Amino acid sequence: MAISRFSYANLRVMDLPKAVKHYTETVGLRLVESDDQRAYFQADECQDHHCLIVSLSDRAGIDHVGFKVNDPSDLVEAAEAAAAHGLAVRDVPLGEIAGQGPGVMITLPSEHNMLLFYHADKIGYAGGMHNPTPGVSKNKIGAKVTHLDHTLLSCENAQPTVDFLTKVFDFSLTEKVVDPGGNLIAAFLTCTNTMHDLALGPGPNGTFHHMAFGMHSRGEVLEGVDILKEDEVPTLEYGVSRHGIAGVTTIYFHDPSGNRNEFYNGAYQAAGKPDLVPPIVWDVENFPRGAFYYENQIPETFFDEVT
Amino acid sequence: MGLKHRGILRIAYVRLGLNDNRLTQSLNFYRDRFGMLESMRDSERAYLRCWHETFQYNLVLEQTAENQLIEIGFHVRDEEGLDHLTNKIEVAGIQVEQSAANEPLNGMGRSISFTIPGGQRLRLFADMAQSGYVTGFESPDWVTPRELRGTAAPMFLNHVGLTSADPGATIDFLSDVLGFGLSEKIVSEDGKRLSGLMFRMCRDVGGQELAIFPGEDGHLHHIAFTKEDPNDILVIGQYLREDGINIDSYGPTKQSYGNTFSLHFFDNFGIRLELCCGGRNIDAHPESEPVIWDESELSKALSYYDADVNPGFLDHSL
Amino acid sequence: MRTFQVELRHSEQSAVQFGCRSDQSILDAAYCAGYLLASTCLRGGCGACRAKVIVGKISELAPMSNTHCQDPVSGKITHRLLCVAAPATDVIIEMDRPWRTRSKNPLSSRLPGRLPG
C-alpha cells in the first residue's frame, strides 16, 4: 500500500560504548540489543524493535535510513519503481539487520541509502501493552523522548530526490526554502500526517545533518536541555529555540561522534496526499527566521558542518 | 508505478444541528470564545475551521428543530478510492446515498453518506475547498493568530467520540470496511469489546480519529481538538472558566487511554468538547498491536489523575 | 603532563600563540587564551574546527571522523579536528576558518577607567 513510517536511522559512530551511554542515559532510549559492532535502541512510545542503530566506524555520519511499508508486495513494487528511475537497488536479506524482516536498499539521487522493509519485531511500549501507566516512569534515566520523529539529510541538489520521493514514493512536500532563482535549497517531506518525516538541506551528497526525537510537551524539551547541560553534551550556539519552519520547540545537540541530534515538540498536521495542499515557501531573506525563529539568524556552522 | 496511500486520508469535519435561532448562541461560543475561524456562511449554515487548518471547515453548524449530530466527514484520497469504498460499504449490506458536488454542504466535491452500525452518519468525499492558511503560504509565523489569543484556539480537529450499543460491531465495520486501525481497546472480564480507538492518520497527536464508547446508538460522546502542549491546555482552562464555560467534573487529566493530556468541557448546548495533546504513537501497519485495557482499570485508563472515573463522563452529550 | 606552545595561523589573520597542556584540547586552550575557534559538535564529528598541523605532532583525545580528516581522492589524512586534538610537541597549525577574539573579563572591563581586555 505505502510507506507507513520513518522507522529508524542507522548512524556511524567512532566509539560504541560512548554512543550507548549517550543514547540511553542522556537521550533516554531503551537499549534493545548490542554486540561489539552495533547497538539497537528504541524510544519509550514505540512498539517496534528499534528506532536507531549505531554502527562502529572510522567516521561519523549516516549509513542508511529505514522506512517501513505496510504491505509486503510494496517491496517488489518499490524496487522496480526505483530501478526504473535509474537508482541502485539491492536486496537486504533477513538477518543482516536484527529485529526486522528482509528489505530493499535504494540509493537516492542525494546518495543516501534508504531501506524499505515490511516486518519489525515487537518489543512493545515501555509501559507495556496491557493497562500501561502513562507518561514516563520516575525511575527513568535521560530525557523523555517518545519516538524518532524525523531526519534531515544533506545534499548538493535536493530537487531530484524530492521529485522521486513525491512522484514515486508518495511523499508530500509541506514546506520548502528557495533561492531568488526559484532553486530548491531545503525541502520538508512527509509520508505520514506529521509535518516532516524526511527533510533535505544543503551540503555534500550523502551526509547527515540531524535526526530529531519527539517529545510530548515543550516542558519536556526544556527538561531535556537541563539533562544535556548536566551531562556536558555540546549544544548548538542557540540553546533552546523555536523553528519558524513548522513552528516547533527545539534544541540541537551532538552525540559523542558529533552526529547532530534534536529534541522536538510540535503538533503540525499534514493532509497526507502529495500536492493536495500547496507547500509553504520560505525565501532566502526569511530563512534565518525559519530556521531559528527567536534569534532570526543562522550560525555559519549550521549547514556547513555535517557528518 | 509507485507506492500510494489509499482510502480515507483524514478526519475533516463534524456537522451539528442546533436549535439556535440564526446560530447566534453557537457562533458566540465556537467562534468568539472557543476560537475557531469563520470560513463561510450560507443561508442555513456557518462553516468554521481551526486556525492551523487550510481546508474550509472542521465544524459545520446549522439551525435544526432539535440538537443533533448530523454527520462526521472524512476526506478520501481520490475519486477512485471513493468508488472503492462505496462498493465495500454496499457489499457490507449498508445503504449508500450519493450526493452531488456542493450538496448538501458547500465547498465539497461529490460525496457519499451512510449510517454505521452504531447509528451515526458518516460522509466521505475526495475534494474539499481550501481557505488557505490564515498565516499565508509565504514565510509564515506559525503562532496562534493575535485575534484568537485568549480563546481555546484549537489547531486541528483531533477525534470524535461516539456511543454504540454494540461497540464490537462498530469497531469491526470501521476496521474491515473503512480500513481504520485500532490503537487501543477496553475489554470486559469476559472478553467483550467495550470501547476502541480507531485511527487512519499517523501524526504527533495521534492514535484516534473515532473513539467508540458503549451506550445508546446514534449519539455523540464528545468532539476533541488538538493543542500543542499541556501547558496551553491548563492556561486555556482558565480562559474558559473566565468566560463562564463549564469544565467537566474532574478537570484536566492524563488520559492513559489514548495517551493524551486532556481537558473536557461543555459548549452552551451541553455538548462535551475536549482539548488534547500528546497521543499514542502508532503506525498504519497490519502488524501494529493495540494497547489493551481491562474494564477493571477504567479509572486508570480514562482519568489517571483522579481517584475514580466521573460517572457522568460515560454519558453521551448529544 | 606537559604544556606545549601552540601557534595558530590563517591567511587573513596575524598568527597567535598560547600554551596548551598535553591532556587539553587545542580548541579549549585557545578559548582560555581568548580565541574563539569555529566549532559545533566538540566531538570530532562535524569538521567545523578542521585544520592542518604543519609543524609538530598532536595526539587524539577521542576518535576523529575520517570524513573530515581524509583527502577525498587520495584517502590520506590531511586534516585534524582541534576539538579532540591535544599537542604532543610544540605545534604550528594552519586553520581552515578564521578565529574570533573574546574578552576574558567582560564585566570588569566595563568599569570606568579600565582598558578593554
Image (cartoon, rainbow, N blue to C red):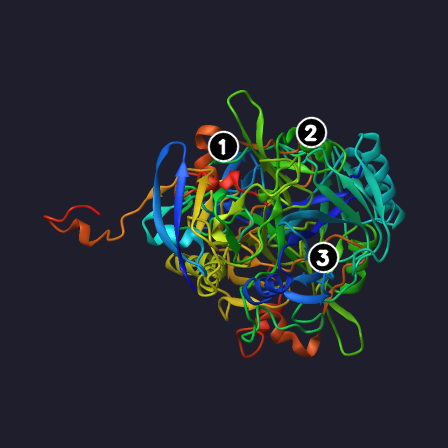
Chain holding disc 1:
B
Q: Answer whether labels 2 and 1 touch (C-beta < 8 Å).
A: no
Q: Nearer the viewer, residue B127 or C96?
A: C96
Q: Which residue is under mark 1?
A: B136
Q: Answer whether labels 2 and 3 touch (C-beta < 8 Å).
A: no
Classify 10 Å Cα crowding around label 2: few (below 14), some (14-19), many (20 and above).
few
Q: Which residue is under mark 2?
A: A160
Query: Judging from the image, what secondary structure is the residue with disc 3 in?
Result: strand
Q: Mark 3 belongs to which amino acid?
A: Met
Q: How many marks?
A: 3
- Residue A167 locus on image (x, y percent): 74, 32
The residue at 30%/46% (across/down) is C102
Quarter of the picture containing the C terminus of chain A is top right
Q: Is residue B59 visible in this depiction of the protein?
A: no
- Residue A42 locus on image (x, y percent): 67, 62
Query: Judging from the image, what secondary structure is the residue with disc 1 in?
Result: loop
Q: Could you give the CA–CA distance between mark 1 and mark 3, rounded to whole angstroms?
A: 32 Å
Left or right: B28, with B63 as reference point:
left
A157 vs B279: above or below: above
Which label lies toward us, 2 or 3?
2
Which label lies toward us, 2 or 1?
2
Q: Could you give the CA–CA distance between mark 2 and mark 3, rounded to whole angstroms?
A: 37 Å
Q: Answer whether labels 1 and 3 touch (C-beta < 8 Å).
A: no
- Residue A262 locus on image (x, y percent): 54, 52
B254 vs A280: above or below: below
Residue B198 is tagged as 3
Specify the quadrant of the image occupied by residue B293: bottom right
